[in-house]
Amino acid sequence: PGLGLTLWLPPGAAASDAPSCDPQAAPIVGGSARLQRQGQMLVYQCPEGQFPYPRPVRECRSNGRWSPLNPPGGRPLAKAECRAIQCPGPLEFDNGHFHPRQPRYNISQTLTFECFEGYTLRGPHNRTCLPNGKWSGGMAICDDGEGQCPDPGIPIGATKDGQHYRVEDRVRYRCGRGLVMFGSKERTCQESGAWSGTEPECRDPSTYDTPQEVSSAFIASLSETVEVADPNRTTSENVKRRIRIEAGGSMNIYLVIDASDSVGEGNFSRARDVLVQLIEKISSYGVFPRYGVLTFATDPKIVVKTVEPESSDADWVSTKLGELKYDSHALRSGTNTRAALQAVLNMIIQQEQDEIRKGHKVAPVANSTRHVLVLMTDGETPLYPQTQLHPPRAGPHD
Ligand SMILES: *[C@@H]1O[C@H](CO)[C@@H](O)[C@H](O)[C@H]1NC(C)=O
Ligand SMILES: *[C@@H]1O[C@H](CO)[C@@H](O)[C@H](O)[C@H]1NC(C)=O
Ligand SMILES: *[C@@H]1O[C@H](CO)[C@@H](O)[C@H](O)[C@H]1NC(C)=O
Ligand SMILES: *[C@@H]1O[C@H](CO)[C@@H](O)[C@H](O)[C@H]1NC(C)=O
Ligand SMILES: *[C@@H]1O[C@H](CO)[C@@H](O)[C@H](O)[C@H]1NC(C)=O
């Protein structure tokens, strides 16, 4: 999937020859609008529990008008409006039933799940629609325990193909209309009794993650990353132990920081300091991954490459990161996330060539290395959050 609409001014586009648009001409019903990028961008905000429809951001076009409000598959709207956030409804549920049945649910409505006889409920009995448009808790699954892998379940808003859960069996997921898939759309039952990939999720584009969700997902994903790389799969051990096993650089961590002018110097420095702390935290576990560090605005700037020998020296990387200055991007009008991710991909390709040159038949970077990407951005590229990064040869660990 692409990044959708990427807003960035080409190098050389100075404020003087930029078009000007009237913010008064593009109000939002029920919310507020603010200008960014020297008046080139209008950002809508709504009260909690609502989202700007049909889109959160408009750009000033060369004809002096704001970009039109085309809802997906609909006719252009005259005015943007704040709409109530809702949670999607289940499209399918195996071996049980749920109620109430609605296409969409209001915030704080509850869904209750029950299983048919012979099936045991895994996951919560009730799930509540949260103010960010997501359901509380994890998947509710009715499982009879007959498969070699547990029933992988069906995320709310998705349909599933595949009813057998023996080794090598596959399930495929699709999201309902207007929802965006996160996680693996296809999973295979592995000999270990676990499904490949990660649990999929179907999200409405208006949903967002709360800081608490980001924090717990980040820890879970970091420890899972390390755990999968550990052939012994000692799930009962704590994160610290598992991460320790990972020592030796078979994990790459890419730290990518948005330095565009919408971020501002204060938030840039905060993002940088958070990442310095992250590096310290990780090395306190006795893990020494390789780091790749880059900043980006209209163009990416590489600070540390994973092929540099010092890239696994946490102190050296922290120092390089700590020295970063916001104003190093002289012309920093744009937020070119795509170019930044491309730069990360190029780093992986370079490391692969490097490893092959050093005599590996199959470059570990493309086969067994775990890749962790931390992108610090204000998200002011209208944003289609799912950006999947594939290493040069997608292996089982991408
Ligand atoms: C959801 O909210 C809308 C608007 O507030 C309301 O009209 C509708 O009755 C609500 N539906 C349910 C099931 O609560
Ligand atoms: C689930 O919700 C129903 C009402 O919606 C309530 O009666 C029940 O106690 C709840 N069950 C649990 C386990 O929270
Ligand atoms: C896996 O466990 C065995 C036995 O406890 C141990 O000898 C071996 O070193 C472990 N392997 C790894 C990669 O930790
Ligand atoms: C970070 O950005 C937000 C939103 O633009 C702003 O309100 C806040 O003051 C900024 N923080 C710092 C430290 O600059
Ligand atoms: C990764 O390497 C292992 C061992 O060398 C090999 O068995 C496996 O097929 C490789 N996977 C890919 C995707 O190249």
Image: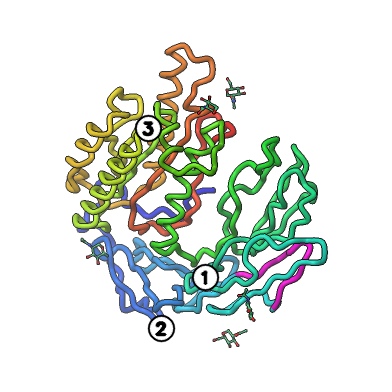
Dot 1, how many residues are within 10 Å of its Cα: few (below 14), some (14-19), or many (20+)?
many
For badge 3, the amino acid type reads Pro
At x 49%, y 21%, the residue is 363
**Which residues fall within the magenta stretch?**
88-99
Labels 3 & 2 near each other (Cβ < 8 A): no
Circle 1 is placed at which residue position?
Answer: 133
Per the image, label 2 sits on a secondary structure element best described as: loop
For badge 2, the amino acid type reads Gly
Label 1 and label 2: CA atoms lie apart by 19 Å
For badge 1, the amino acid type reads Gly
Per the image, label 1 sits on a secondary structure element best described as: loop
- Residue 30's disc is 2
Quadrant of residue 140 in the image? bottom right
Label 3 and label 2: CA atoms lie apart by 48 Å
Q: Which quadrant contains ligand 5?
A: top right
195 to the left or right of 84: right
Disc 1 versus disc 2: nearer the observer: 1
User: In the image shown, does 335 or 62 lie closer to the viewer?
Assistant: 335
Label 1 and label 3: CA atoms lie apart by 35 Å
Circle 3 is placed at which residue position?
Answer: 289
Could you say where residue 343 lies in the image, as x and y percent from the top left?
A: 38, 36
Per the image, label 3 sits on a secondary structure element best described as: loop
Mark closer to the chain start, 1 or 3: 1
Mark 2 within 8 Å of ligand 1, using the beta carbon: no
Dot 2, how many residues are within 10 Å of its Cα: few (below 14), some (14-19), or many (20+)?
some
Figure label count: 3
73 to the left or right of 312: right
Labels 1 & 3 near each other (Cβ < 8 A): no
